[in-house]
Amino acid sequence: MKCITPYIIILLAAISGASVRGEESIGEPGQDQAGIRFFETKVRPLLVEHCYECHGPDSGKGEADLRVDSLEGLLKGGLSGPALTRGEPSQSLLMFAVKHDGAVAMPPKKKLPQAEIDALGAWIKMGAPWPGSTQIVAAATAKDSPNQWDEEARQFWAFQPIRAVEPPDVHDAEWSASPIDRFVLARLNAAGLKPVEAADKNTLLRRVTLDLLGVPPTPAEVDAFLNDHRPDAFEHVVNRLLESPLYGERWGRHWLDVARYADSNGMDDNLAYSDAWRYRDYVITSLNTDKPFNRFIHEQLAGDILAGSDPERRDELVVATGFLTIGPKMLAEDDPVKQQLDIVDEQLDTTCRVLMGLTMGCARCHDHKYDPLSLSDYYSLAGIFSSTKTMITFRVDSKWNTTGLGSVEAALRLEDLEQIADRHDNALVNGNTLVMTPEERTAHANLLDKVWKEYALIPKAMAVTEGEIGDLEIRLRGNHLTRGAAAPRRFPSIFASDETLPITASASGRWELAKWLTSDSHPLPARVLVNRVWRWHFGQGLVRTVDNFGKLGETPSHPELLDFLSRQFIAEGWSLKKLHRHILLSKTWQMSTARNEQAAQLDPDNRLLWHRSRQRMEAEVLRDSLLSVSGLLDPGMGGPAMESTPFQNLSLGGLVRKPELYQSTRRSVYLPVLRGAVYDVFQAFDYPDPAILNGDRATTTVASQALFMMNGELVHQAARKLGETITAEPLPSDRDRLQQLCQRLFCRAADDDELEQWSQFLTQYQLAGSLRTESEADRRKLAWEGLCRALLSSNEFIYIN
């Protein structure tokens, strides 16, 4: 910084219209004269001497877009945000800068004398008086009360209570047995449209079985349904499917999508999550038993707390908190504060998007640009997660927290081993290698290896526990080094009411958060969940942006129907299976995919639900269906997805790319999900990125999908096995075998034209010149395999009508 003489300082002050000394009025009438004098004698000189070179009147717009030669410039701030907050030195970036207590240190070469720092803080605390500043106001600050949000924000549809609505009256009695149908039909009638006809029984059975179980029905199940002429025959099918253990595997996968489940960390260190499978199995079991969904949420956010009053279910409840631990983490981050806040941010954003459909992570640096979510709201919620122990330590090569399962002795021993391992690990990572002898380093490494081997033998779960309880300080502009005032732990201010549960000073607040989210008066979680279920049944939600119910999301196509189903869901004990029944037994869900030109012109996106939209099998459903129809599917449930040791680096030796990881023939939900190296078959068919939650999978049509169906090893295996099975059937003729093949793949009888074409295919294939050297038996085998591969690759197999 340039040295400026006191004479020049006095001259600059005079030019600014202010006197450095004297008793006369030096500000506008009504201004604090003592404060103005303090500014002119203590503050303006230090700004001129130390700051003007880079941020003064001759600096243009100032370095980092900051000017300090006016109060407007300081309040506006630069690239890092406002430089000061009047009356709040602890929340002013200017104070962090001059204290050299942040990412920016000013002046950069030498810290100000403490007396000048104190003077600057005192001036800000006075309210930053400045001559001629009576009309200058700071930008709006974060809101802490719903009364401070404007009427438009408070009246946004997603923040309104779930309404009690009655299904509308409609004139078509046959189509109005279900309340769902009455809402849909009323909208269609208003648009001058009508629904298409119902799907036939073959189509309906294949659709519902793939929908609920993720595999096609068997020929025997098709025959049983076709021969069941009871009026409630389809209802019996739905009940049977919901009681199948395959239901939890299919619908558990939907929840794992939004829980961003994975068996590895990804990011900088792709370490194995060798115990994540326990959370996966917990989800599948919970759905199979139709655990009330509010309880399901309680356990995932606060299972470790609930375990204290339910010791018999301790292991299950502890495993449930894997929801908070299985996200990706930057384990090589060398700043412990940043690492912790990044993990807290991932937990907070996931929880809010999954359960409320709100992008709360946008408020980490500033008030949300579109939704009524403030910076202080964010850090109030973040304090709940920062009071939760997720990691053993926050440093380079950090390790996540686990909890021992089974006996109390095992749990306590695991805690001991974590502390011992942490000591040796810290010595190896952060120890003084210049002082440490090679023998000492080897000893640390050997002891650490011994600890990890014992650690691996103890049954455990990735889980959270209560941590160091306390409120979190706001990080100004999201910078983890620039701390502001503490934000008391609470829930977003737009939802504040007299019914809001207080958070005790002695607990993290996760249990209170779980209860608040599942309270009957909360407007979002039930709506969000019902909408997700609707999307998974229909291919698009009533709110198409299933992960965003904010202003950037879409409004509901049928808002009354969404509220009706949400209230019904809560009233029926948050039962997912009851919700399935209501949807599946409706005429709306049972419509065919038939096209209506008038409706297609008026509603090309089918938002009014005038017909059933055709859907392609998801990646897992396609793989499982290939294995199922060919007889290769292994029905085994649960257990580890792969062999690994705790904290094993899966990138070393290219382990994440080894094909043997995916050679299992079990359901796809049990295959390893490795971040940064997702199974190539899944990638080809739009499997979501497991690093982030995703409740709405895309459906693309690209050449690689067709190439996989024609040449993929999995399809070859399925076609070969299916051909062997069909030709071994004790049937009178190949025509009967072709009929059986059609039943297996398409759940219907083949017509005469198809049988003729397929028979010609078999004959011509066996006569191909390339097979001249093969035996007659081998030519027949290859011909059936080729036909099976062609039919497995057909749109009728891959798409669900």
Image (cartoon, rainbow, N blue to C red):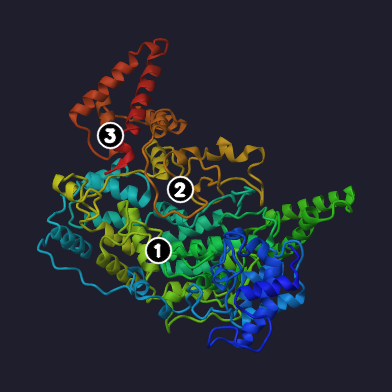
Q: CA distance from mark 3 to mark 1?
A: 35 Å
Of labels 3 and 2, the one closer to you: 2
Q: Is residue 319 visible?
A: no
Q: Secondary structure at mark 3?
A: helix
Task: Specify which label sits upstream in the sequence, 3 or 2.
Answer: 2
Q: Is 4 positioned to the left or the right of 488 in the image?
A: right
Q: Which residue is mark 2?
A: 688
Identify whether 521 is placed above or below 177. Answer: below
Disc marking residue 196:
none
Q: Nearer the viewer, residue 590 or 103?
A: 103
Q: Secondary structure at mark 2?
A: loop
Q: Residue 411, how many percent across, how many down? A: 67, 65
Q: Quadrant of the N terminus?
A: bottom right
Tell me which amino acid carries mark 2.
Answer: Pro
Task: Specify which label sits upstream in the sequence, 1 or 2.
Answer: 1
Q: Which residue is mark 1?
A: 290
Q: Residue 105, how many percent across, how many down? A: 70, 64
Q: Which residue is mark 3?
A: 742
Q: Nearer the viewer, residue 418 or 503?
A: 503
Identify whether 771 is placed above or below 536. Answer: above
Q: Residue 648, how many percent across, how many down? A: 66, 48
Q: Quadrant of the C terminus?
A: top left
Instruction: Please name the residue shown 28% across and 54% down the image.
Output: 237
Instruction: Please name the residue shown 42% across and 38% down the image.
Output: 627
Q: Nearer the viewer, residue 685 or 61?
A: 61
Tell me which amino acid carries mark 3.
Answer: Cys
Q: Secondary structure at mark 1?
A: loop
Of labels 1 and 2, the one closer to you: 2
Tell me which amino acid carries mark 1.
Answer: Asp
